[in-house]
Image: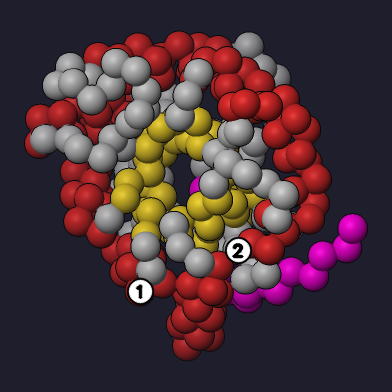
Amino acid sequence: MFVFKRHFRGLEREVSGIRFSNPVGLSKPAELPRIHLFSTPGVGFLTLEPEQKDILQWIHRLPEIRTETGALLAVNMKKDIERTFSLVYDFADLIIVDLDSNEGIGSSDLSDIHLILEELLNLRLCYERYTPVFLRLPAVLDADEMHSVLSYCMLSGINGIVAEGLGTVNTVLEKTMKRIPLIGTALSAEEGQAMLAAGVSLAELKTRPAEAGKLLRILEKEAKKS
């Protein structure tokens, strides 16, 4: 199927060895039947969440979705982390480990995060293809927990971090001194623009596709001026 995808000039960038046509992405729920609708703004990537009830059929749709949308695919894993990692590894352009709802996470003891990530990074060594792995920060972290998680990410083989909200994004940028790629999750084009201006590598919008299109037009206009 041929799909027209608008190219926004001057917005290309490389993150963790991946070449993105632009830094704007859309977060999409698990169901996939009408995923092609999300390609209309010309986003650089889509964040998809596996449908656990029939994950093998879901995975088999990923190459088709990549072709239909023309976007790179980031897979956000929340459940059955190790098995899902093994299944999606060869099909995803980027993997996001989301432990916020995982069993054992949510207590003050975040040792599970380190253990699970280390297992995944060791598992990655078994594959010939190298796929970047990002950690989505849990929604609630106190200052000590934030320091612990960010320190681990900086010293381990984790390729980047995903953080939601401008306040959290600014905290991560400050504490990491922008030494590790950061994807900022925004709820509007304006928030995404502010995150990119602050220094995030990519902006993932959890909103309507029209907001992504709006942000891309803003960024393209800014690029033409520079």
Q: Residue at x 35, y 74 (%)?
A: 190
Image quarter where the N terminus lies is bottom right
Q: Is residue 8 magenta?
A: yes
Q: Residue at x 64, y 62 (%)?
A: 38
- Quote the CA–CA distance across marks 2 and 1: 16 Å
User: Is 116 drawn above or below residue 203 in the view shown?
Assistant: above
Query: Is residue 149 visible to the viewer in this orientation of the structure?
Result: yes
Residue drawn at x 76%, y 39% as measured from the top left: 61
Q: Residues within 10 Å of mark 2 (few under 14, many from 20)?
A: many
Name the kind of residue labelled 1 in the image.
Answer: Glu
Q: Position of residue 21 (x, y in %)?
A: 63, 61
Q: Which is the main secondary structure of the residues drawn in magenta?
A: loop
Q: Is residue 17 visible?
A: no
Q: Badge 1 local density, few (<14 within 10 Å), some, or many (20+)?
A: some
Would you say residue 103 sits in the magenta stretch? Answer: no
Q: Nearer the viewer, residue 138 or 17?
A: 138
Query: Which residue sits furthest front?
Result: 53
Q: Which region is colored magenta?
A: 1-15
Asked whether, in this view, residue 145 is left or right of residue 173, the answer is: left
Across and down, in percent, residue 198 comes to: 29, 63
* Front one among 21 and 216: 216
Q: Which quadrant of the view contains residue 108?
A: top left
Q: Secondary structure at mark 2?
A: loop
Residue that label 1 marks: 190
Vertically, is 180 above or below 80?
Answer: below
How far from the left and from the top, in percent, is residue 25? Answer: 53, 58
- The x and y percentages for residue 98 are 41, 32
Q: Earlier in the sequence, mark 2 or mark 1?
A: 2
Q: Residue furthest right?
A: 1
Mark 1, secondary structure of its residue:
helix
Reading the image, the residue beneath label 2 is 43
